Amino acid sequence: MHCGSGRRKLKSHLSWLVLWLPPLAGAAPNEIKVFTDEIAAYGEHTLEMHANKSSRAGPLAENRASPLQLLPEYSYGIWRNWEISLQFPVAVAQGQVRTNGYRAEFQYVAPHADDEGWYRGVNVEFANLARNGEQRLWNVEVMPIIGLRVERWHIAANPGISRPLSGPARNINFEPAVKLAYRAFGENYFGVEYYLEAGPIQHWLPNNQRSQVLYLAWDGKIGKSDISAGLGRGLSGASDRWVLKSVFEF
């Protein structure tokens, strides 16, 4: 009876959450992550290392390079429910290390129950970045955070937008992400993540020109450190073919 009740609650909550999710439809970004309610506590310092590597870019990608991408990230809980992060992306290719700029993030998550129910928040990023040797540009990104925990299930969605603040193109781009995970045992979650770069919000790119990647993902712990890993498959000609990603928190 308890499991059946949980499934009914999950189905009811999902009917509301799907209103925010993208329809399943260049190179991998430095940070491949669905933002959830996980932030540094007030006064806490954390250090994360993001890493990802694609096998090769899709045939329609503007830049076919696929370097190893590393992203050290320092975060600090500046106030209750508030976190600031500094990131310094790096690309490694053919024995050369190249810095790709820098970025700062502010994240807020509203007070909520830790193990059950809805949560909400927002992540705002300001960045000066260059992807794969392209021109460095200023960019702002806003990622709403909508999440739900029901028993062993965890669902999170980021219906995000981004906009270049320099350069010739100033379109507002739609870049949503979604995560569905199941706690199998202990602190080990297994699930899927989906990332979409749909293009200008006023006029989406054709389906085969959007970057779309679906990941099988695992989140767990090694000692006191959080770790996650995922294997992604591109779903369009503009997507990387295969992508391996990981995040390790110290």
Image (tube, grey):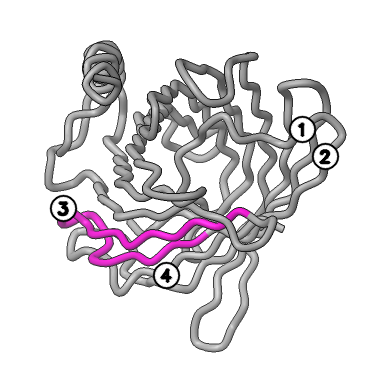
Residue type at mark 3: give it: Ser
Which mark is drawn over residue 236? 3
Q: Earlier in the sequence, mark 2 or mark 3?
A: 2
Do the numbered discs 1 and 2 sit on residues whose CB atoms are within 8 Å? Answer: yes
Q: Is residue 74 left or right of residue 52?
A: right
Please tell me whether the stretch drawn in magenta is mainly helix, strand or loop: strand
According to the picture, the residue beneath numbered tag 1 turns out to be 41
Q: Nearer the viewer, residue 128 or 246?
A: 246
Q: Position of residue 47 (x, y in %)?
A: 73, 54
From this viewpoint, which residue is outermost toward the front?
1
Do the numbered discs 1 and 4 sit on residues whose CB atoms are within 8 Å? Answer: no
Q: Position of residue 175 (x, y in %)?
A: 36, 34
Q: Is residue 215 left or right of residue 225?
A: left
Q: Earlier in the sequence, mark 4 or mark 3?
A: 4
Which mark is drawn over residue 44? 2
Q: What's the CA distance linking mark 2 and mark 3?
A: 40 Å
Q: Secondary structure at mark 4?
A: strand
Quarter in which the N terminus is drawn: top left
Which mark is drawn over residue 102? none
- Label 4: how many Cα within 10 Å (few below 14, some 14–19, many 20+): many
